[in-house]
Each structure stands twice: as C-alpha cells, then as structure tokens.
Amino acid sequence: MKQLVTLNVNGNTYSLAIDPWRTLNEVLREDLNLTGTKLGCGDGDCGACTVLVNGRSVSSCLTLAVAVQGKEITTVEGLAQSGEKLHPIQEAFIEHGAIQCGFCTAGMEMSALNLLKQNPSPTEEEIRTAIAGNLCRCTGYYKIVEAIGDAAKKMKV
C-alpha cells in the first residue's frame, strides 16, 4: 500500500504517494527526475549516491524515502543557488580537473559540502578522511583533494 510523503528537496516541497520500501535514491531519480544523484553499488559502499539530509551525508541507496519525510534534503542539483553560477565546490572541481568520467562527482561534491560546513579549513588528511566513503576509479583522488582544499578557500571569501 502506497504511503503519502512530503519531501523537501533543494528547497522545493514534493508530495508523493510511494511504496514504503522505496529508497530515497529511487524516488529522487525516478519520481523527481533528479538524476545527478547516482546509484553505484546499491550497498552504501561507493558513495555515488551521497546526499545531505538535514546537513549530514547519507547514502540515499540505503535510506528509505519515508524515513526522511519533513527533513531538508540537498542533492547535487541544489548546490548552486541558480542555474547561472556554480557553487565554489563545483567551480574548484572543474578548475582542478577533478572530474573524469563524472560518475562519482556528485557524491564527492556532497561529501565535500558536508565537510566544509563542519570544518571550513580542513587539512589534507581531514579531506581524505571525509571522502573515504566515496570511491573514484579515474582520478586517483589527488585532484579531488586539491579541489576540495581550494573550494574551502573560495568559500571563506
């Protein structure tokens, strides 16, 4: 039996009738057409599906959509305030070539946002720890770590 839920995603409110066993990832991608959040492993190991719920990183593939009703959900589509200007994290990823195939990018950027909201001046080690749950098969992480460090500086200005 479907359940009526109200989700606040990227500042927009959505009312949906969904099956109670559907994950947040499924609802974001299939019902709300927010496909920036990827589904990688489906087991919470790769980080491609990372979103923020009430400002904290969660694996949307492991989170039931009914469990986040009434909470603030931020996806990669909600990073930039407008479609015209990128968020400093997104700018830094582009400037540092931290995007290769792009599959992990959204999850990496959301983990970076989570880190920088809690720690605006992270060390390289703290950045590496913050993205430890996000797997990238292309970049070797160096450019990603560098981009997050640069984004921290940009966000202070």
Image (tube, rainbow, N blue to C red):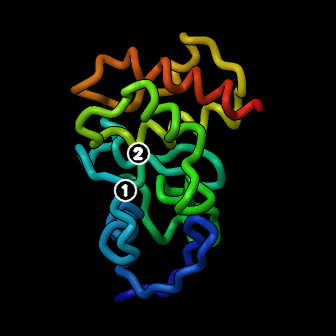
Q: Which of 57 and 147 is in front in this view?
A: 147
Disc 1 is placed on an element classified as: loop
Q: Where is residue 48 in the image (x, y as percent from the top left)?
A: 34, 43
Specify the quadrant of the image occupied by residue 46: top left
Q: Position of residue 82 (x, y in %)?
A: 59, 62
- Image quadrant for the N terminus? bottom left
How dense is the environment of label 2, judged by Cα within 10 Å: few (below 14), some, or many (20 and up)? many
Q: Which of 27 and 156 is in front in this view?
A: 156
For marks 2 and 1 on the same chain, the one whose residue lies earlier in the sequence: 1
Q: Nearer the viewer, residue 8 or 154?
A: 154
Q: Is residue 154 left or right of residue 30?
A: right
Q: Is residue 87 above or below residue 81?
A: above
Specify the quadrant of the image occupied by residue 3: bottom left
Callout 2 amino acid: Ala
Specify the quadrant of the image occupied by residue 116: top right
Q: Residue at x 39, y 15 (%)?
A: 142
Q: Is residue 18 above or below residue 23?
A: below
Q: Position of residue 72 (x, y in %)?
A: 63, 62
The residue beneath circle 2 is 106
Q: Residue at x 50, y 43 (%)?
A: 110
Q: How many numbered marks are there?
A: 2
Using the numbered discs, state the Cα–Cα distance from disc 2 to disc 1 in whole angstroms: 6 Å
Say whether marks 2 and 1 touch (CB < 8 Å): yes
Disc 2 is placed on an element classified as: helix
Callout 1 amino acid: Gly
Q: Residue at x 63, y 69 (%)?
A: 11
The residue beneath circle 1 is 36
The numbered disc on residue 99 is: none
How dense is the environment of label 1, judged by Cα within 10 Å: few (below 14), some, or many (20 and up)? many
Q: Is residue 155 above or below residue 60?
A: above
- Image quadrant for the C terminus? top right
